[in-house]
Image (cartoon, grey):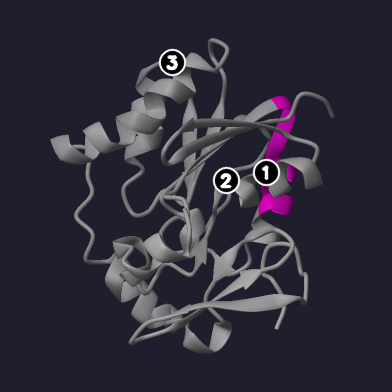
């Protein structure tokens, strides 16, 4: 077994519940589910199809605003972005576009045609915890980011083992990778990015140079 983020092979058992085992990388501190206990792609998509997120859902708009508002404060006027993992309804892309930041969406299940070009910002809200190979995703993001681009991520963070045991976030079987502040610090150091912890579930990573 190796870590799906940093490929390290020193892995420790972290937690077991009635459904799955969780493992932690001793280097980047990512907590993850082993491949044998993941859902099939068909079962995974069936769960996503039940989501009712839309631009008419006021609660969902408020939820996304907790990410969109601080992101907009960190962007230059007219910055162009990519909403990576946007789901069937690219609500965040619409919110940002109407605020003067043209944004397109990509989703491996619902919008699998990746828009061409590079971007001034890439955002990923409540999606990175679903990715089987987050290391490859970060590499992909870096290839899509312009110099001085911003990468914004929204995901709930692991605090410690005691809280993890009773954490509702892990109970969603489509969630397979769990990041902590230490994990994001490793990402920043490894990819020469600058990390900002902007909230309890929001981080920004800045590419300050090529």
Classify 167 as above or below 195: below
Residue at the right extreme?
Answer: 210
What's the residue at 67%, 27% (across, down)? 149
Whether label 1 touches label 2, CB < 8 Å = yes
Q: Main secondary structure of the magenta part?
A: helix
Q: On the rendered structure, is 86 left or right of 119?
A: left
Of callouts 1 and 3, the N-terminal one: 3
Circle 3: is it few (<14), some (14-19), or many (20+) Cα within 10 Å? some
Residue 56 shows up from this direction = no
What's the residue at 68%, 62% (across, down)? 5
The CA span between labels 1 and 2 is: 6 Å
- Residue 154, horizontal then vertical, whole percent: 45, 43
Circle 2: element type: helix
Residue at image mark 3:
100
Classify 49 as above or below 21: above
- Residue 10, horizontal then vertical, whole percent: 76, 76
The CA span between labels 1 and 3 is: 31 Å
What's the residue at 53%, 64% (across, down)? 131
- Residue 139, horizontal then vertical, whole percent: 74, 52
Residue at the top extreme?
Answer: 77
Residues drawn in magenta: 138-148
Residue at image mark 1:
185
Residue 64 shows up from this direction = yes
Whether label 1 touches label 3, CB < 8 Å = no
């Amino acid at each position: 077994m190796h870590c799906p983020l940093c490929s390290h092979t020193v892995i420790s058992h972290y937690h077991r519940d009635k459904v799955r085992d969780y493992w932690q990388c001793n280097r980047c501190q990512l907590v993850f589910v082993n491949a044998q206990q993941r859902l099939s792609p068909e079962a995974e998509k069936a769960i996503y199809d039940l989501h009712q997120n839309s631009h008419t859902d006021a609660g969902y708009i408020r939820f996304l605003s907790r990410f969109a508002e601080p992101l907009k404060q960190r962007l230059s006027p007219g910055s162009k972005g990519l909403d990576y993992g946007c789901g069937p309804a690219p609500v965040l892309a619409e919110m940002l576009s109407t605020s003067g930041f043209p944004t397109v969406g990509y989703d491996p299940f619902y919008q699998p045609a990746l828009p061409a070009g590079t971007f001034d910002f890439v955002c990923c809200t409540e999606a990175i915890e679903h990715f089987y190979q987050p290391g490859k995703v970060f590499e992909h993001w870096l290839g899509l980011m312009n110099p001085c681009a911003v990468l914004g991520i929204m995901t709930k963070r692991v605090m410690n083992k005691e809280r993890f045991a009773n954490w509702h976030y892990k109970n969603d079987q489509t969630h397979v990778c769990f990041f902590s502040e230490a994990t994001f610090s490793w990402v920043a150091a490894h990819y020469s990015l600058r990390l900002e912890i902007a909230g309890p579930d929001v981080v920004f990573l800045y590419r300050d140079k090529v």
